[in-house]
Amino acid sequence: MATTIGIMVGSLREHSYNRMIADTIPELVDSAQYEFISIADLPLYNADLDREESPESVKRYREAIQQADGIIIVSPEYNSGIPGVLKNALDWASTPTKTAVLIHKPAGVIGATPGVKGTILSQQQIRQTLDAVQSYVMPFQKMYISQAMEKVDPESGKLTDETTRRYVQRYVRSFIQWVDQVQQMNGQ
Ligand SMILES: Cc1cc2nc3c(=O)[nH]c(=O)nc-3n(C[C@H](O)[C@H](O)[C@H](O)COP(=O)(O)O)c2cc1C
């Protein structure tokens, strides 16, 4: 069966560059299946809401992660770090502590910015959070996209820069192999 990859975007902006890059992934590597996992309707994390009967949006979100073989996060950097909406979403996926859906889940991180430093700082924090949740973040490749506005086409809403398309394609192909390796390690 084809690997199912959940794609999570760390920006809620309508014309988000990160969303455009995420939306391009399925056409770059068609050997996997993709599910886009929405974080927009999650409430702010509140342990009082995090009971057996959690909010519907949280249930849907956790189920979507559960069903994916691996998760790729495509996110901007805000104030030298992880966007609050994404941290909130990862916190919701980190509980209940012993059965959280991100535990032992393979994860990849891609980030795009109109700036020149490619979301390095944001990705460090995303990796740190995924580490805390015991996800297996692909260790050997990084995907930093700078000057994103020159690499996408706002009309089609897709990543159009050929070199970057090749890099993302290579990253996603490696990620599929990483999912296989982690599944073997997990005895799946
Ligand atoms: C509150 C805020 C803080 C930002 N901080 C950074 C930053 O630290 N580093 C960076 O590269 N870009 C920063 N930016 C610019 C974002 O990279 C830019 O808005 C980008 O387009 C957001 O990603 P998106 O297009 O996917 O929404 C910041 C933007 C906002 C709104």
Image: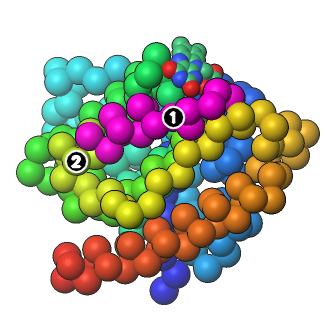
Left or right: residue 46 compared with residue 58: left
Q: Nearer the viewer, residue 9 or 41?
A: 9
The tally of labels here is 2
Mark 1: is the Cβ under 8 angstroms from ligand 1? yes
- Residue drawn at 90 percent across, 39 percent down: 155
When asked about the image quadrant of residue 121, the answer is top left
Q: Which residue is mark 1?
A: 119
On residue 131, the disc is 2
- Which stretch appears magenta? 114-128
Q: Are marks 2 and 1 in contact (CB under 8 Å)?
A: no
Depicted 110 relative to depicted 86: above or below? below
Pointer 2 or 1: first along the chain: 1
Q: Amino acid at mark 1?
A: Thr
Q: Amino acid at mark 2?
A: Asp
Left or right: residue 93 compared with residue 107: left
When asked about the image quadrant of residue 162, the answer is bottom right
